[in-house]
Image (spheres, rainbow, N blue to C red):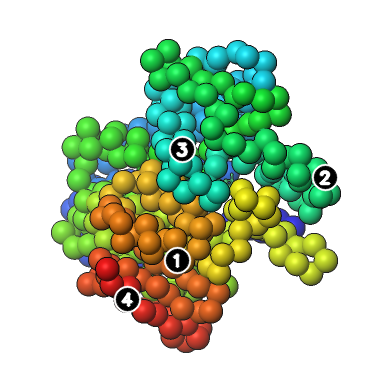
Amino acid sequence: MKRAISFLLIPVFLLLSGCGVQQAQEQFFTMDTVMSVTVYGKGAEETASAARQVVETLNGVLSRTDGNSLISQLNAHAGDGTAVELDGDTLELLTFAQRMARLLPGDFDITIAPVMDAWGFTGEERHVPEEETLAQALALVDSEKLLLDEAAGTARLEEAGMAVDLGSIAKGYAAARAEEVLREAGITSALLDLGRNITLIGSKPDGTSWRVGIADPQDDSQSLCVLSLEDQTASTSGGYERWFEEDGVRYHHIIDPKTGYPASSGLLSVTVISPDHLLADALSTALFVAGPETAMELWRSRTDFELVLCTDQGQLLVTEGLEAGFEFRGEEQGYGYQIVRR
Ligand code: ADP
Ligand code: MG
């Protein structure tokens, strides 16, 4: 079953009251999602277009469905001993992904690709795989068998059939690269909506904070809460964006690498807020698999991100760093919330 694309994080109050500020917006479809880049200030038009180009170019490098991409080349040589020469972007991203897999072992793994394929999430025919097919695919998932040689700038996958899928982090990385382009052009106010990854550059042109809504995972036309943010990414992962139904059961696209099945950790969605755009994207996927206890444990051990977890019991767990800019909106839909302290 295919669903129309919808925006899960809704930038509200995007329109400005102040006038006289140049504004430009680019809307486009890449990385399998609808994106938009809105830029304010001098040179807004050229800069918005340059930011878009960065994201589209990265898609051509990182996509595993584009046969010409570097990632496709890496995957095509799995098991044949060839070390594939990569560019700086790809190498950086693979290195980061491996670190993330070591941080949250069993929750995050970019070599999940064979399992995504077994479920048909890569193509149009989504289905519950045969047990044996799934077991074979799962046996190929192991980030430690992605061998990176940073000095040589190469990588290879140790076993035939292995493949890398950067769907969990490509948008966060694209946001970081697009921000560089915007900053270099002197832009201090912009909003990048890269499909459930909302990146806020600076503040709104009138100097006030951006306001970002987090969607209700059970009805994404409604907001659960609104956050006031600046210079950060809010990245949301949930089981409600890509899914299909078979025999009355719903199956979604975020896979638990321990089982090969869609993750069910007691969460409906995870939003990670961080000035590190890539980290936000990676952690939203990983913590959705890991569940609320691990998520809060990791949050307590670090200071570089905040969380909004939506549990399957209808509770929002909001970490205290967000408290000042948090507005609850989920009452009518029957949600409650709790501020989590360190
Ligand atoms: P979306 O891309 O839908 O906004 P995410 O950032 O959470 O959401 O990424 C989901 C994608 O990550 C999946 O489509 C798949 O490509 C990949 N993926 C699924 N499960 C995992 C996992 N456990 N670890 C790493 N990547 C995963
Ligand atoms: Mg992600």
Label 3 belongs to which residue? 97
**Residue that mark 4 sits on:** 339
Q: Residue at x 75, y 63 (%)?
A: 245
Question: Foreground mark, 4 or 1?
Answer: 1
Residue at mark 4 to residue at mark 1: CA–CA distance: 15 Å
Nearer to the camera, 289 or 175: 289
Give above or below for 271 relative to 124.
below
Mark in the foreground, 1 or 3: 1
- Give the residue at the far left of this rendering: 207
User: On the image, numbered disc 2 is attached to which residue?
Assistant: 132
Task: Say what amino acid the circle numbered 4 marks.
Answer: Ile
- Circles 4 and 2, Cβ within 8 Å, touching? The answer is no
For marks 4 and 2, give the CA distance: 44 Å
- Please state if 77 lies on the left or on the right of 290 as rendered: right
**Residue found 55% across the figure and 74% down from its top:** 312
Q: Position of residue 39 (x, y in %)?
A: 29, 46
Label 1 near ligand 1 (CB < 8 Å): no
Query: Against 127, is 220 above or below?
Result: below
Instruction: Give the residue number, with chain letter if any, for mark 1.
Output: 293
> Mark 1–mark 2 contact, CB under 8 Å?
no
Secondary structure of the residue carrying tag 3 is helix
Residue drawn at the location 66% of the way across and 30% of the way down: 162
N-terminal of the pair, mark 4 or mark 1, is 1
Q: Amino acid at mark 1?
A: Glu
Quarter where residue 140 is shown: top right
Residue 246: percent from left, percent from top: 80, 62
Q: CA distance from mark 1 to mark 2?
A: 32 Å
Q: Earlier in the sequence, mark 4 or mark 2?
A: 2
* Amino acid residing under circle 3: Ala
- Residue type at mark 2 is Glu
Question: Dot 1 surroundings within 10 Å: few (below 14), some, or many (20 or more)?
Answer: few
Q: CA distance from mark 4 to mark 3?
A: 30 Å
